[in-house]
Image (tube, rainbow, N blue to C red):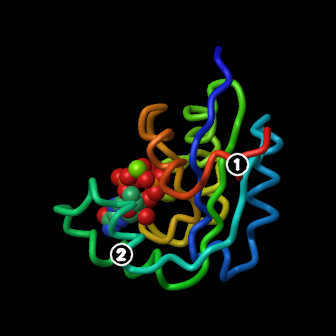
Amino acid sequence: MAVERTLSILKPDATRRNLTGKINAKFEDAGLRIVAQKRVQLTTAEAEGFYAVHRERPFFGSLVEFMTSGPVVVQVLEGEGAVLKNREVMGATNPANAAEGTIRKEFAESIEANSVHGSDSAENAAIEIAYFFAQTEIVA
Ligand code: RTP
Ligand code: MG
């Protein structure tokens, strides 16, 4: 399998509860390497732009409000099959459906405040990484 990169976000519910180290340990234990990372406060416009694909969904307004409710940590994770591997480590969107040992099973508060974001395809990963990082900020 090829070495890939994916965009990860530790969401405001995770930063608020001081869980960034515990979540990063899950990524690293799974063989993913954090090759870029920064803590940022998203503006409403930035969150709306990032989630533009969900603009018509009923939860869009609430999601944008949540994602701007506190700092987030945006990251680039690198590894073999990183996109799929990260989504496996994250677990299902709704923590009620997340498998044992996953980040969302262990830490998520609700379907919205579910602690982490991960790109859903290699194509979207490239777009999402470029949304937050310059090439020079990613150090493998
Ligand atoms: P993500 O994009 O954050 O990695 O999560 P995902 O692919 O598992 O979920 P997606 O369907 O892309 O939804 C994006 C985020 O929107 C929030 N959400 N709320 N209230 C709801 O029914 C609902 N559904 C989704 C979650 O924060 C989800 O991660
Ligand atoms: Mg998604």
81 lies above or below 40: above
| Disc 1 element | helix
Q: Residue at x 27, y 69 (%)?
A: 60
- The disc at residue 64 is none
Residue most extreme to the front: 136
Query: Can I make out residue 97 in this image?
Result: no
The answer to which of 63 and 135 lies nearer the viewer is 135
Tell whether circle 2 marks a residue whose Cβ is less than 8 angstroms from ligand 1. Answer: no
Q: Residue at x 79, y 34 (%)?
A: 31
Residue type at mark 2? Ala
Q: Residues within 10 Å of mark 2 (few under 14, many from 20)?
A: few
Q: How far is disc 2 from disc 1 in space, using C-alphas?
A: 24 Å
- Image coordinates of residue 64 in percent, x first then y, are 37, 75
Q: Is residue 39 left or right of residue 9?
A: right
Res 6 quadrant in image: top right
Q: Residues within 10 Å of mark 1 (few under 14, many from 20)?
A: few
- Image coordinates of residue 109 in percent, x first then y, are 54, 72
Q: How many marks?
A: 2
Residue type at mark 1? Thr
Q: Nearer the viewer, mark 2 or mark 1?
A: 1
Which residue is the site of mark 1?
136
Which residue is the site of mark 2?
45
Res 78 quadrant in image: top right
Q: Is residue 21 left or right of residue 126?
A: right
| Disc 2 element | helix
Q: Are marks 2 and 1 in contact (CB under 8 Å)?
A: no
Q: Is residue 28 left or right of residue 119?
A: right
- Image coordinates of residue 21 in percent, x first then y, are 81, 64
Q: Earlier in the sequence, mark 2 or mark 1?
A: 2
